[in-house]
Image (cartoon, rainbow, N blue to C red):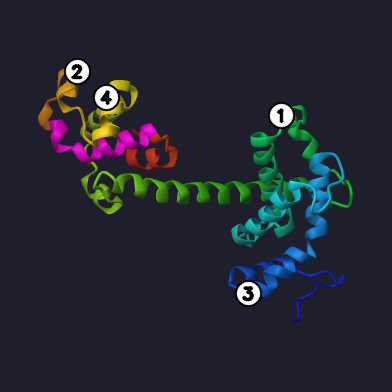
Amino acid sequence: MVFPFDDRANPVPDDLVLKAQQGDHETREYLIRQYQPYVLKITSRYCHRFVKEGIDDEISVATLAFNEAIDGFKPGQGSRFLSFARLVVERRLTDYFRRNKAWFNEIPFSDYGTEEQDGVSTLSALEHQAAEKAFSDWHSARDRREEIIYYTGVLGAYGITLQELVKISPKQVTARKRAQEAARAVADNIKWRNHFLKYKELPLKELDGMLTFSRKTLERHRKYIVAMALVFIEDLPHIREYLKGDDGR
């Protein structure tokens, strides 16, 4: 297999990443193998100790993160692949230690800056900023996709589809705000929330007695209220912002 090289006889990562993203498994394996020393250096630096393959779980976390970076990287955003991959690896290690290591809080995140250490290249301020933005955009997009997949399943249990939800969302601001008020009331009231989750129906009688608008309004927007109540209960911020409407209200 022939790989592209730059003037310094180093592989050009962006070209290889594009091939891997297009389904070239041999290139993906080559990337992971070729840059494993880079991943090990990042991991050792992050952990403030030398890590060894087959012994330290952090290496598995970092290697999976590097593979994840291959899928998430987008050329042309001002960030080089290795800078982007470094951020993904560090953030995944951060998640790992938050879940599993009590001593994580003793290590300041500032320690993982851009200084040269153990052969890990220094990043310029602009390069680091570009990598941060690329990572942030990718992470947000991934979170949105995961929320949509999860929310689609939750809605399905209540007989609602995403396509249907788009059609039934109240167009008028006042109607939308009233429906959201009802949904929030269901989510915040433990008794009503338990009833809603157990029987998959709104406590319309109780809501009718508490809210300032009529039961007819509640019934007209029942599915939208159900959908919003699920968003509040499940804490889905991306879906919530979308369903609130373009005016943000």
Q: Which residues are magenta?
A: 217-233
Q: Which residue is mark 3?
A: 24
State which tag comes first along the sequence, 3 or 1: 3
Q: Which residue is mark 2?
A: 210
State which tag comes first along the sequence, 4 or 2: 4
- Specify few, some or many for label 2: CA neighbours under 10 Å numbering under 14, 14-19, or 20 or more: few
Q: Which residue is mark 1?
A: 102
Q: Position of residue 157 (x, y in %)?
A: 29, 45
Task: Give the secondary structure at mark 1.
Answer: helix
Q: Disc number at residue 152? A: none
Q: Which residue is mark 4?
A: 192
Quadrant of the frame with the N terminus: bottom right
- Specify few, some or many for label 1: CA neighbours under 10 Å numbering under 14, 14-19, or 20 or more: few
The answer to which quarter of the image holds residue 246 is top left
Q: Residue at x 31, y 36 (%)?
A: 228
State which tag comes first along the sequence, 4 or 3: 3
* Residue nearest the viewer, comparing 31 with 203: 203
- Specify few, some or many for label 4: CA neighbours under 10 Å numbering under 14, 14-19, or 20 or more: some
Task: Give the secondary structure at mark 4.
Answer: helix
Q: Residue at x 69, y 49 (%)?
A: 61
Residue 229 highlighted magenta (yes or no): yes
Amino acid of disc 4: Trp
- Specify few, some or many for label 3: CA neighbours under 10 Å numbering under 14, 14-19, or 20 or more: few
Marks 2 and 1 sit apart, C-alpha to C-alpha, by 46 Å
Whether label 4 touches label 1, CB < 8 Å: no
Amino acid of disc 2: Met
